Structure formats: C-alpha cells, structure tokens
C-alpha cells in the first residue's frame, strides 16, 4: 500500500511539473543591450511599446495554457490518471515570454544609459475572473 501511494505521489509530481507555468513565474532571459544602444530615445520607446504589447499577448496565452493544463491534470488524475502523462506545458511559448521580458529589461537599461527618461511600469497582476 505504501509503495502504491508513493508511486502515485511520484507520478503526480512528475506530471504537475510538466504543466505550463503561469506567466508571472517565468523569469526574464538575459538579453544584451548592444542592439538597443544604437537606437534613439524615440526608437527605444517605440520598440518598448511593441515588445510590451507582445508580452501582453503571450502572457494571456501562457496563463490560459497554465489554467487548461491544471484543469486537465486534475481531471486526468481523478478520472484516468495515465492520461496525465500526455499533458505538456507550452515550452515554446514560455521561452518566447522569457525572451520578451528580457528584451524589456534590456530596453529599460538602454533607456537609462541614454538618459531618455522613459518610464517603464511593471504591469499589475491581472485579477482572476470569477466564473
């Protein structure tokens, strides 16, 4: 009995680690500021807006994937636990979000180095919708 319980717990933790992460848990990748140092302050602001818009889009997709994976995992573990092994997070999307977050950090660093005075605000965590 103890071996079965341990096996189920081990399998559950393995499956849960494969689920998509929430966007706020994804760290920014290291991105060089070299590309952005050549830009004017106006170009940095324009690029920062473009990257920020894309971060918003990918954040929404990533959070939806995380929510969908969590629901699917819960159902799979209760109804048919072997199906849980087929739940995979979206690593490509998470990598893109990490890179984009890194680009925003690099743009902010380039802006500070040039004295552009551009204000980079961190977005507030979106409120969960009641369903």
Image (cartoon, rainbow, N blue to C red):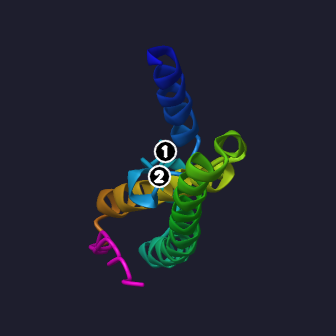
Q: Position of residue 19 (x, y in %)?
A: 56, 47
Quarter holding the C terminus? bottom left
List x then y, in percent, for residue 18: 59, 41
N-terminal label among 1 and 2: 1
Cβ atoms at labels 1 and 2 below 8 Å apart: yes
Q: Dot 1 corresponds to which residue?
A: 29
Give the residue at the far front of this rendering.
Answer: 1
In the rendered view, does 47 fall on the left or right side of 89?
A: left
Q: How far apart are the two marked residues, 1 and 2, measured between alpha carbons?
A: 5 Å
Dot 2: what SS?
helix
| Label 2 packing within 10 angstroms: few (<14), some (14-19), many (20+) | some
* 71 to the left or right of 88: left
Left or right: residue 84 versus residue 30 is right
- Residue 128 on the magenta segment: yes
Q: Which residues are magenta?
A: 117-131
Relative image position of residue 128 (x, y in whole percent):
35, 77
**22 lies above or below 123:** above
Percent position of residue 65, x then y: 59, 62
Give the prevailing secondary structure in the magenta stretch.
Answer: loop
Q: Nearer the viewer, residue 105 or 5?
A: 5
Identify the residue shown where x is 45% and y is 57%.
22
- 12 vs 54: above or below: above
Could you say which is closer to the camera, residue 41 or residue 28?
Answer: 28
Number of dots carrying numbers: 2
Question: What numbered label is drawn on residue 102?
Answer: 2
Q: Is residue 119 above or below residue 112?
A: below
**Residue at position x 47%, y 52% in the image:** 102
Identity of the residue furthest to the top in this view: 3
């Amino acid at each position: 009995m103890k071996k079965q319980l341990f096996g189920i717990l081990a399998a559950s933790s393995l499956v849960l680690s494969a689920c998509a992460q929430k966007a706020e848990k994804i760290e920014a990748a290291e991105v060089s500021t070299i590309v952005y140092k050549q830009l004017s302050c106006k170009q940095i602001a324009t690029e920062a807006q473009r990257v920020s818009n894309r971060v918003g889009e990918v954040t929404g997709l990533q959070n939806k994937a995380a929510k969908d994976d969590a629901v699917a995992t819960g159902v799979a573990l209760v109804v048919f636990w072997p199906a849980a092994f087929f739940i995979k997070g979206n690593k490509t999307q998470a990598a893109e979000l990490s890179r984009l977050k890194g680009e925003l950090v690099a743009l902010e660093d380039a802006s500070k180095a040039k004295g552009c005075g551009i204000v980079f605000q961190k977005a507030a965590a979106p409120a969960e919708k009641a369903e």
